Amino acid sequence: MEGARCLAPRTFWTMTLRVVTVDDEELSRRVLREYLAACPEVTLVAECANGFDAVKAVSEQAPDLIILDVQMPRLDGFEVLELIGSSAHVIFATAHDEYALKAFEVHAVDYLLKPFSQERLSEAVTRARARIATGAGQTPGTLVSDVRRRQSDRLLIRDGGNVHVLPVDALDFAQAQDDYVLLRANGRNYLKEQTLADLEASLDSQRFVRIHRSYLVNLDRITRVELYAKDSRVVILKDGARLPVSRGGYSRLSERL
């Protein structure tokens, strides 16, 4: 391994890359540490053993590049990507090749299949350096929305360096607030950086209905629908919350109640 170097063009050598590695296996983290040490102008700013630590490290360290395992307990690599958004370029590193297509669909810089060599990692780091230097390859809106449109049985909410994990069943309703959604669950409000349209696409349409341009509701929480004014209605939830219903929303609601 002696003498191995990242073969980056000289125009990129003056740019130091701040890197975070995320892998639940200690051996894999150690290998990455040794391989990255052979790359010039690379600083390893954090090593993370799980997705929660990764979100915290990205929030605190603001790295240029994340080398991210896919299969991890509690939070997998794609869930980490959902939470961190497009704040850094990502190289996926995993022992499972079935995730390769999905990795490139969310605009990963590269996909390393374990076990990989130092030279192979060097190529991936060089590719990341070139992307960062030219400003190419990052499409934040597409990257984040592609990940979030996966239907899941839980909701992930980033609060600074902390992560809240909510079962979808706990969601009472969601309200659009510009580029965020307010999620009401378990008697608390949570703010998530996501559009209501993206949230709607990730939920089961048989259980969650868009009743208004700004509101999405869990059908299980509705106790009744009341006429509020002429051609205007509200839904009353089990906790007493009252949400407006548009004409189109009432039509969609009527089909499912």
Image (cartoon, grey):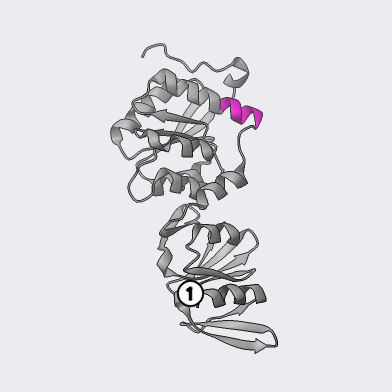
Can residue 195 be spotted in the picture? no
Looking at the rendered structure, the kind of residue marked 1 is Leu
Can residue 54 be spotted in the picture? yes
Residue with the most extreme front position: 255
Q: From the viewer's perspective, is residue 57 above or below residue 171?
A: above
Chief secondary structure of the magenta span?
helix
Q: Residues within 10 Å of mark 1 (few under 14, many from 20)?
A: some
Q: Say which quadrant the N terminus sits in.
A: top left
Residue 111 on image: x %, y %: 45, 31
Residue 216 lies in the magenta stretch: no
Per the rendered image, the range of residues in magenta is 129-135
Q: From the viewer's perspective, is residue 243 above or below residue 61?
A: below
Q: Residue at x 66, y 76 (%)?
A: 247
Q: From the viewer's perspective, is residue 37 above or below residue 101?
A: above
Q: Residue at x 42, y 43 (%)?
A: 77
Label 1's element? helix
Q: Quadrant of residue 212?
A: bottom right
Residue with the most extreme top position: 3
Q: Residue at x 34, y 44 (%)?
A: 72
Q: From the viewer's perspective, is residue 193 above or below residue 190?
A: above
Residue 223 on image: x %, y %: 48, 84
Residue 106 on image: x %, y %: 53, 40
Name the residue beneath numbered marker 1.
219
Return the residue nearer the eye: 104 or 24: 104
Return the residue nearer the eye: 8 or 185: 185
